[in-house]
Amino acid sequence: MSNPARQSDARFESLELPAEFDDLTGLIQSDLRAIVSVLIDRADQRLLLTRRERMALKKRLWNGLTGVVNKALEPLTAECR
């Protein structure tokens, strides 16, 4: 049986851009994936991360970067202007 608390811990945040930026979602997601991948690979090479450490870092990087983008673009909607 799966643990619901553990499932929520494993969640990656989604990129939620305002409608005015919808056409950029795929491009931004690809760029974020590339950034996270490069940083994970470098950390793994230098620090010899375990699988658990690698996944935790990947989640932390992804959630942090998507959170920053979401928050920065949130006020740039037609409703807020």
Image: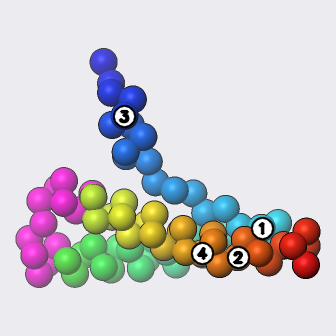
Give left or right: position of 17 versus 65: right
Q: Residues within 10 Å of mark 4 (few under 14, many from 20)?
A: some
Mark 2 or mark 1, which has the lower sequence index? 1
The circle on residue 5 is: 3
Name the residue furthest top: 1
Q: Amino acid at mark 4?
A: Val
- In depth, the one of 38 and 78 nearer the eye is 78
- Count every numbered label the image shows and give the total: 4
Mark 3–mark 1 distance (CA, rounded to whole Å) = 29 Å
The residue depicted at 65 percent of the width and 78 percent of the height is: 72
Mark 1 or mark 4, which has the lower sequence index? 1
SS at circle 2: helix
Mark 4–mark 3 distance (CA, rounded to whole Å) = 26 Å
Mark 4 or mark 3, which has the lower sequence index? 3
Q: Circles 4 and 2: CB distance less than 8 Å? A: yes
Please name which of the two marks, 4 or 3, marks the residue nearer to the observer. Answer: 3
Which residue corresponds to mark 4? Answer: 69
The magenta segment: 44-55
Which residue corresponds to mark 2? Answer: 73
SS at circle 1: loop
Q: How is the image coloured?
A: rainbow
Which residue corresponds to mark 1? Answer: 18
**Quadrant housing the C terminus:** bottom right
Q: Amino acid at mark 2?
A: Leu
Q: Circles 3 and 2: CB distance less than 8 Å? A: no
Give left or right: position of 61 versus 56: right
